Amino acid sequence: MSPDQQKGKPDWHHNHNGEELFVEPQPDHLVASEAGSTASDLGVVGEATHAAKRALLGRPLSNAEEGEQRLSRKLALPIFSSDAISSSAYASEEILLVLAGAGASFLIYGPIVALGIGLLLGLIAISYRQVCFGFPNGGGAYAVAKSTFGTWPALIAASSLIVDYILTAAVSTAAGIAAITSAIPSLAGVRLELALGAMGLLVLANLRGLRESGRIFALPTYLFVAGAFGVIGVGLIKIITGDPAVTWSQGVVIQAHETATILLPILLLKAFAHGSVALTGTEAISNGVASFKKPEAKNAASTLVVMAVLLGTLFLGISLVAFAYGKVPQEIGGETLLSQVARASFGSGPLYALFQVATTGILLLAANTGFNGGPQLARILAVDGYLPRQVGQRSDRLAYGAGIIIIALAAALLLIGTDAVVTALVPAYAIGVFVGFTISQAGMVLHWRRLRNAGWAGRALLNGVGAFVTAVVLVVITAAKFTDGGYLVFILIPLLTIFMKLVRNRYNLHERELSIKPGVVFDAPHRPRRILAPFGEINRSTVRAITLGRILEAENGELTAIRVVFSDDEEREVRTRFETLFPGVRLVTVDSPFRAIVEPICHYLDEIEDEDADLPPDQRRINVVMIPEYAGRHWWDRILHNGNGKRLRETLLGRRNTVILDIPYRRDLE
Amino acid sequence: MSPDQQKGKPDWHHNHNGEELFVEPQPDHLVASEAGSTASDLGVVGEATHAAKRALLGRPLSNAEEGEQRLSRKLALPIFSSDAISSSAYASEEILLVLAGAGASFLIYGPIVALGIGLLLGLIAISYRQVCFGFPNGGGAYAVAKSTFGTWPALIAASSLIVDYILTAAVSTAAGIAAITSAIPSLAGVRLELALGAMGLLVLANLRGLRESGRIFALPTYLFVAGAFGVIGVGLIKIITGDPAVTWSQGVVIQAHETATILLPILLLKAFAHGSVALTGTEAISNGVASFKKPEAKNAASTLVVMAVLLGTLFLGISLVAFAYGKVPQEIGGETLLSQVARASFGSGPLYALFQVATTGILLLAANTGFNGGPQLARILAVDGYLPRQVGQRSDRLAYGAGIIIIALAAALLLIGTDAVVTALVPAYAIGVFVGFTISQAGMVLHWRRLRNAGWAGRALLNGVGAFVTAVVLVVITAAKFTDGGYLVFILIPLLTIFMKLVRNRYNLHERELSIKPGVVFDAPHRPRRILAPFGEINRSTVRAITLGRILEAENGELTAIRVVFSDDEEREVRTRFETLFPGVRLVTVDSPFRAIVEPICHYLDEIEDEDADLPPDQRRINVVMIPEYAGRHWWDRILHNGNGKRLRETLLGRRNTVILDIPYRRDLE
């Protein structure tokens, strides 16, 4: 130990190349440097893989490099609301698609349905405003449900949110690409390829540890909002000035739909259900309260209000202007409604092009919500034991790699299955969100009731109304979309919920198996033992096991090598060879005329244990069974060996008074 | 030790229930009884599974219970020739199917094609007669090719035979069921189910360790031969007496096929190729020379001649009588040609029914050849290292279970893929057999040339002609059947051949890795060591590793527990807990701000190894790294744990001066 260490002062440890690997702030407490966290001697393939990984993902990031940035309202607005606001780029179109399916004359109901959704948005925003105050550490539906209803509702909420994160990634990417193909129709044929490529870039960015807190994230959102206001503003001016582009004065009137009197409510509810995708993402701000500058809850709440007003205005404005221009959705893969409206307002010049770029930008940001929020929720679930631990581990770029890749794969499957058509994805979308809305609002009612602080009744009533309305909407949109693909959500959510509960059950069981009684102190071992080394072929792996057995017996054990043989000739041959190689080691051979291998060894163990039958249990000898294993480099090397060793291990595991040691062997041949 | 043992006399070891488990003929040399080979304490599910297995498969058989029975010619004939003789049940039909496809008037060529095949049979039989004398220990194509041409041709021959064993099982089962559905046409709809059921029974019988040497195996073969002679004899009488059932005199004459003058040779070759399935199984006797009574080679050779004469007579006779009766193959799934012919000779009474039963019987015996010969060939290949060792292991019923099940699965797939229709299976059949014929006859030429004993030149010439003719036939039948399904064989044989070579290469590599230098004696270990116990959570599995580490350090090691931590708080918490639980054990913590786990441990190992850098290599300390492992009961329990332990183990395996110990832990909760 160097003098520095003895004084407890940091002291760098170097390797032969002079790289600093560790610093040792206290004796026996090392801190690894970047070099100390990187594998050495990777070989040619390993080095190339490593270099490729670094080139793609960048150098490792230390925990200390994660800047914990508190967001101003100006920055938080674009970051948290890209998902919500961007839905105004396609929600109006989805409403009109339903209406246009019943006949052009039904389009007049478009702004009316949009108004209904706008009102619902207001109610949800007010409800979630309260979540900001009630759960200032971040009140996702999972957190709220966990602290109020308990496990099952929390898991259902979590499953719904995960399903919707996947759909957010898929729908927003598809819509972002639709904005591009609207401006450049010749690209419509490679829509799916573009969408998968864009998603690939998002995945890469997130694996690199993309932080959403950068100012660059604000730009597309503000640009889109400004552009959309421009589109609407020009539209309104044209309406007022009676511009010829405005066609509604030219004969579109509400006609008497005699055949539709009964079906009209159903049609409107269906349009409402499809338009409700506008509401996805509304809950994002309440999840991220902790990221706001102080006072967090107040800042978050007012940002939420601004977001809701912006979203509502844009959504209603676009719906209205689209109707005024007489624009209708085109066939699948054609120009988007928003693009048509923007052309009508801006012409097809640079202003229009810029707006399309901004639209794509905000939609890809919204898609990124899936890759950002989804894995974070998965990490929380992994920490709580509802998902495998690997999901909660951060990569060397501080990203939750496993979660990102799982969500990307699921979203890519959806894109491939629907050929990246937004309308085909919408039926499954929003259902999960409304499950989350309902559970979290209902949970808030319980939360306020439990708190019973001043004015709790009013707050509980408000969240109660929110819960009731979102529950009704959930039923409505489920009924409207179920057969179109919504049923998928009702298969996925229960499966995911049950899966998470099962994972947790397994972890609970394992914890019980592995738990240590409190207050125990483990002394140096004193139990006498018996060392057993069953083996098959006599090779280097066997030699290693016997050698270790001799070390273990040195103090107070007894080493017995055991070999199952199938004939007297084999017995003689094995014994001669063994006794030459390992003089002084006892060999017991078991001839097995019924060709069983594992069972005679177990019976032999039973038998020798009987020697201790008269001793009190804590003085009986421990059996240490050493199982040599050939650890090939590849799975195909391994299936060619070790079958009997594995079966023996499986049979003996959990046996009383028995410790199993696997002794893997591999030699790296030059 | 009992006095008996000291005198070296047998002495039974009993368990608590008084069951005799072992006898000990010499000290430390036990022999397990049946009870000693059976697992105890299986639990409820285990007991039920065990009981079900015993009920299905019977009690275990000891090696001593394998009766080695030498066969008389009378018994050997039916046992070895069911495969060959039974092909007369469908081969004529396959010829006529091809001819009838070109027009009814072409049927006249049926007996002519059959005659060609009969001549070929004669040549092959004479060639194989010589194999009986040349390889009296059993001269399968693999054995002949291995001892003459070497590895690759031997593996190609083996692959061809395995493919044909599978096809034998499938074709013969399908043909056996066709004999039943011919008699009872209402069963035609469940043809596939019947075929799979029959195959299931064969598999079960073989897993029970069915021996083909029983007298019962002779019955269907002799019954079929007698019946077929009856069918032919009655037919000949009817021809002579000008019975009205004989229709050939009523106008079928050789017409001038003007359009067919060019195509006729191709048609005949195709008919020949399809009829050549009659030749499969001819080689069986030469494989089994060792099972004959003395003088083995002579008895086998004369049995081979009898078999060839029987097969040739039956095949030609059935072809001729079928033509005389004017019977043509029916559409797929209809009555078989042989059944039609038998009805024409016997009527539809009890004689006919008995003949159909005998036909099904001999065909299922032929199918059984696949389940018997295939696994035995696979065992020889496993012993030679060309297939995984498991394939060569015998079950407790002395059966090669793995081989039986693999062949059954492949044959069942073929039956399902073709709906158990013989004609659909035939194109792939016989190609593999002719590959084996050609390789083995060519190998025999080399064999005689090498021996150069009296008359070798004549024998070599005969086998040379055999090799040449079978090679030509191989090309002909390949060309004729390639596009109909024969190409499958040309995909399967190379794949199987390469697979077997790769398996052997891996075993060779592993043997080099594991080999011990000759003449070495391993003394009791003296190398000083350092014991390292990296761990994650502190639980029972960690306790077991630390405890073992303390045992190992007792003599001359030094135990260091290693824990990677991610923050100072964690460091303090882990250290406090560890030092309370394990007083006196050194704990090194490695803070890893880049979240790497395996790499810092490796660098730490490098670093401490440097302490020994000045010592000569054989005095440097050995690192014993103990890796605790939670061994859950199921794979889903295991994927939830041990990720880091596995990665550490993989990284350290093969490292110089380092021994890895896996310490699996499982507690059986009550």
Image (cartoon, coloured by chain):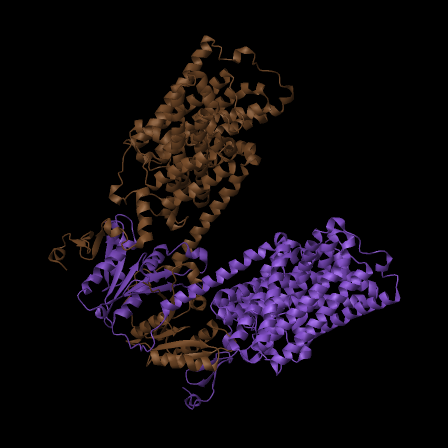
Chain colours: A purple, B brown
User: Could you say where residue A558 lies in the image, as x and y percent from the top left?
Assistant: 23, 67
Left or right of A406: which side holds A660? left
User: Could you say where residue A123 lies in the image, as x and y percent from the top left?
Assistant: 65, 69
Q: Nearer the viewer, residue A98 or B511?
A: A98
Q: Quarter of the image holding residue A86?
A: bottom right
Name the residue located 61 percent from the left edge and 80 percent from the top edge.
A296
Position above or below: B629 against A648: below
Position above or below: A126 against B428: below
Quadrant that contains the N terminus of chain A: bottom left
Q: Is residue A103 visible?
A: yes
Q: Quarter of the image holding residue A556?
A: bottom left
Q: Nearer the viewer, residue A586 or A29?
A: A29
Quadrant that contains the C terminus of chain A: bottom left
Left or right of A572: which side holds B420? right
Q: Is residue B449 visible?
A: no
User: Could you say where residue A381 lies in the image, as x and y percent from the top left?
Assistant: 51, 68
User: Could you say where residue A97 lies in the image, as x and y percent from the top left?
Assistant: 73, 55
Number of marks in picture: 0
Name the residue located 51 percent from the left edge and 58 percent from the top edge.
A495
Q: Nearer the viewer, residue A484 or B24?
A: A484
Position above or below: A441 against B182: below
Q: Residue furthest top?
A: B241
